[in-house]
Image (spheres, helix red, strand yellow):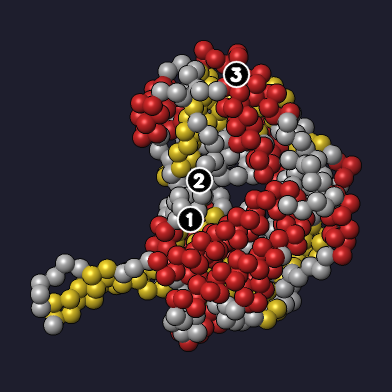
Amino acid sequence: MTTLTRADWEQRAKNLQIEGRALIHGEHRDAVSGQTFECVSPVDGRILGLIASCDAADADVAVRDARATFESGVWSRMKPVERKKIMIRFADLLDAHAEELALLETLDMGKPIAFSLSVDVAGASRAIRWSGEAIDKIYDEVAATPHDELGLVTREPVGVVAAIVPWNFPMIMTAWKLGPALATGNSVIVKPSEKSPLTAIRMAELALEAGIPAGVLNVLPGFGHTVGKALALHMDVDTLVFTGSTKIAKQLMIYAGESNMKRVWLEAGGKSANIVFEDAPCLKEAAEAAAMAICFNQGEMCTAGSRLLVQRSIKDQFMPMVVEALKGWKVGHALDPETQVGALVDQGHLNTVLSYIEAGHADQAKMLCGGKRTLEETGGVYVEPTIFDDAHNKMRIAQEEIFGPVLTVIPFDTTEEAIAIANDSIFGLAAAIWTSNLSKAHLAAKALRVGSMWVNQYDGGDMTAPFGGYKQSGNGRDKSLHAFDKYTEIKATWIKL
């Protein structure tokens, strides 16, 4: 782990060279229109650089290049063992450039530098390496056939993949898409969020350095309503993968239907329930996890434990523990290695989070702590972690995804009531339960309509566990071998011998 101080990081930030152009066929390019937009750091309000504002014309160029590269076979028909070597080299380069990537990530979207290093860069590298290692470990099938026939079930790459990734975990989300998409031989076009485009561009540069051929990985910075829409409507994009809001996910499904029926895989919003029963094995541990579940990454997580359901019999004992645990999450300048809660992504999102805090007051929920903007003197956009107590599940702060460090506490009496409250949501991404009763844990886990279920912990799992949601939290899965299904076609070949 690095021993750099805040002063060290700030000096590096001053010397940082920002690349904001698109990357197509291994070359940096301005947008066809010549248009740019400013990349503003939420850490302190500085302008980091100008970013190419790509649109439909750039999408056409990138898709044509990706298609030609795919059809050439330079990557799609490369020996699996060779693709594996390049993917692992790519992961090694991410590790070698960890501090540079972490600095870009923090300056771009505001998360604490310590977490950019230990979580984001490490997680991205791990995802790429894991997918690379899987390349020569996935086998096709032979069907059960008569002696004079042979049935083969084989996987083939889908072709051109457009990946639209979010601003809250730019590196990790890009890696979760790139890993299996590249491993299976596709050509990929990444559209990073206009709020955090920098690390996707740098990752693509490192992919080229690792040996991934030009045209296999193109990056188009720009806005969702311009270049994102163009990719979703493009007739020569075979698969669209997306992580972001449920509203945009629904629109992308419409675009796919209006164009070429491209496959669309979506990881959308969440309003996850963290349920603490009176027989939780350790209330202090549960309280610390509840604070982490809403404070980590400034609450800008689709899996944030934003609904804390507490059994009424222990609520008076438990909630002071949560408030105390929350104090341990230090809000500070994002380049300070001691900071645990950094800046929100931009001023617009700060305004959104503050509007939900006002909504909590309007609905007469009881604020226990936080609720205000802080550190304005830095020029950045920071907000205090906030707890609303004595809420009910019909309040806006209990139903809508805030995507900030705002925790809504809802009491319950019985297991059946807790499950009903937790499932009373349009989302179904994740949930957690805390109990010492093994039967209760299993039965509740089965009853909760979510894609990720945690027991006596929050946000567990690794690359071997699939990630995705039920209901309006999306479809398909990232991580694990299940993710490879999104990027391959299954072909049945029946041969008469």
Kindly indicate the quadrant of the structure image that contains residue 154. bottom left
The residue shown at (65%, 65%) is 94
Structural crowding at the residue carrying mark 1, measured as other residues with C-alpha within 10 Å and reported as few (<14), some (14–19) or many (≥20):
many
Q: Does label 1 or label 2 sit earlier along the sequence? A: 2
Give residue 320's mark: none
The residue shown at (49%, 78%) is 82
**Residue 285 locus on image (x, y percent):** 59, 27
The reply to whether discs 1 and 2 touch (Cβ–Cβ < 8 Å) is yes
Give residue 461's mark: 2
The residue shown at (83%, 65%) is 16
Q: Amino acid at mark 3?
A: Phe
Mark 3–mark 2 distance (CA, rounded to whole Å): 26 Å
Can you say whether 420 is above or below 488 in the image?
Answer: above
Q: Secondary structure at mark 3?
A: helix
Q: Does label 3 or label 2 sit earlier along the sequence? A: 3
Extreme residue toward the bottom, this view? 72
**Mark 1 sits on what residue?**
479
**Mark 3 sits on what residue?**
318
* Front: mark 3 or 2: 2
